[in-house]
Image: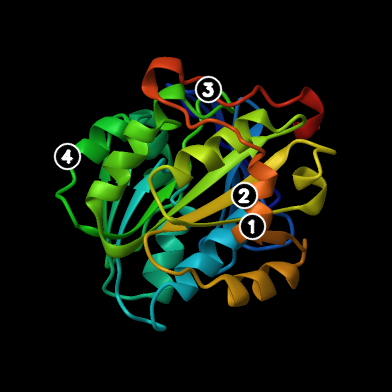
Amino acid sequence: MPKSRVRGGAPEALVETVDGGLAELIPDRDRDRAWTLLLDGAPQSHVDLDDPTHLGFAYQRRLGHIVDLIAPAKQPLQVLHLGGGAFTMARYVAATRPRSTQQVVEIDVPLAQLVRRELPLDPGARIRVRGVDAREGLAKVPEGWADLVVADVFSGARTPAHLTSTEFLGEVRRVLKPGGHYAANLADGPPLAHLRGQIATAAAVFPQLALAADPAVLRGKRFGNVVLLASELALPVAEWTRRVATDPHPGRVEHGRDLADFTGGAAPVVDASAQPSPVPPSSVFT
């Protein structure tokens, strides 16, 4: 059962056991009606119910820039989210691109129920939540349906192996419209073998790639998040680079020859040899 307390008029943390472990909703002391979702101590999402355009995590800001740049402002999109968390990006799309149609695939049904109960979605938003595995849900999406597929799937702070392969990305490309975009939140640390393999895997499926991250992560100095962007058409690299560089936590965008050099000859990942992403060091969340 959930445990929630209000003390002195201020909301307190809410804790509930879900399929993925212990879910915590922690109130943001600096923003009214804003919350951070943690799973087993690992931060998953930040949501401001009063301002869904506020993206508190650096990687979510980089995803938000992608949402802004892949189509003219306020043009509705059809978006598939693999991994729900607190539905931060779905809320962002609904707020910035009204009349968008979105599907969220979240295997952890109790987590989705907790979020919808405590952090309710706008009833006018066209957001459908499906409680199945990400790859199973992906397989049920019609060919050429999505303008954008966002993958942000973690189980125990690791991306599951079956969501790291060329076969998985082949299914992603199947559901994208011609010229559609794929964006993924990846996590890795030194020696960045997982990240290099994921870039090689995406390059085997999509001709255009770019990624954004904290420079220290790209230099292999620490563990962190990397946002990968892919499409069959040219990417909005210049403007994405500018926005990422001027974020509160500035990042760097790599693409073209520099990105190919960074990959360093890594081989694409296939289902038969796929591994989950590395376990984050305990210091990441402390």
Front disc: 4 or 1: 1
Q: Earlier in the sequence, mark 2 or mark 4?
A: 4
| Mark 1 lies on residue | 257
Q: CA distance from mark 4 to mark 1?
A: 36 Å
CB-based contact (under 8 Å), mark 3 and mark 1: no
CB-based contact (under 8 Å), mark 2 and mark 1: yes
Task: Look at label 2 and name its amino acid.
Answer: Ala
Question: Helix or strand or loop: what does disc 4 sit on?
Answer: loop
| Mark 4 lies on residue | 140
Left or right, residue 269 beside residue 140: right
Q: Earlier in the sequence, mark 3 or mark 2?
A: 2
Task: Look at label 4 and name its amino acid.
Answer: Lys
Q: Quarter of the image containing the C terminus? A: top right
Q: Which residue sits furthest top?
A: 272
Task: Look at label 3 and name its amino acid.
Answer: Pro
Left or right, residue 107 beside residue 283: left
Question: Helix or strand or loop: what does disc 2 sit on?
Answer: helix
| Mark 3 lies on residue | 276
Left or right, residue 54 beside residue 242: left
Q: Residues within 10 Å of mark 2 (few under 14, many from 20)?
A: some
Question: Helix or strand or loop: what does disc 1 sit on?
Answer: helix
Q: Residue at x 23, y 48 (%)?
A: 174
CB-based contact (under 8 Å), mark 3 and mark 2: no
| Mark 2 lies on residue | 260
Image quadrant in which you'd find residue 178: bottom left
